[in-house]
Amino acid sequence: MSAVTNPATVEECLRVGAGFSQGDRNWIAEQCATLDARLASFHADATDLEISVKDREARGQKVTLECWIGGRDKIVTTSSEEDLHAAIMDVRDDLRRRLTDAKTRQEPRHDKHPPTPKNQDQ
């Protein structure tokens, strides 16, 4: 596996969408920084993240975190948590799980124990 020369980070790839201001961006990036370890295997110039919130701090608010990585399907995570901080943690953790799942599906499998042929003469 070759190393990525310009690894993606939340700080570099995050855009704030509807419901958030540029002033919220640094705080959100800090909250989502644990995604960096998962994003590091992707190129920064081919990775985009966008977080938005609908009906911020109202009953029924919805936080959405979208992730675009070149050559892959867009990943969308959402949370309806009433607490904004909890909702951001929810979409962050869901994105981390989904990135891990996507990466696992694309990696070749290496069976530790190949199947043994049936009816083998001993």
Image (cartoon, helix red, strand yellow):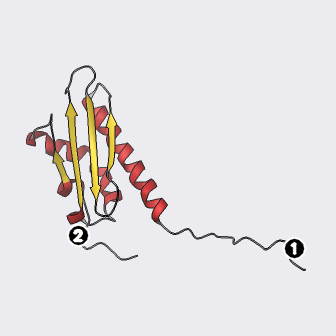
Q: Nearer the viewer, residue 13 or 68?
A: 68
Q: Which residue is mark 2?
A: 6
Q: Residue furthest bottom?
A: 122
Give residue 109's position: percent from left, percent from top: 56, 68
For marks 2 and 1 on the same chain, the one whose residue lies earlier in the sequence: 2
Q: Which residue is mark 1?
A: 119
Given the image, on which type of amino acid does mark 1 rest?
Asn
- Res 5 → quadrant: bottom left
Task: Say which of 44 and 71 sits in front.
Answer: 71
The amino acid pointed to by label 2 is Asn
CA gap, disc 2 and disc 1: 52 Å
Residue at (20, 26) in percent of width and height: 55
Quadrant occupied by the N terminus = bottom left
Task: Indicate left or right for 37 with 113 as reference.
Answer: left
Q: Pick the quarter of the image with the C terminus.
A: bottom right
* Circle number at residue 85: none
Helix, strand or loop at mark 1: loop
At x 58%, y 70%, the residue is: 110
Q: Quadrant of residue 9?
A: bottom left
Give the x, y percent position of residue 91. 33, 40
Which one is nearer the viewer's eye here, 26 or 4? Answer: 4
Which residue is rendered at x = 83% and y = 71% of the image? Answer: 118
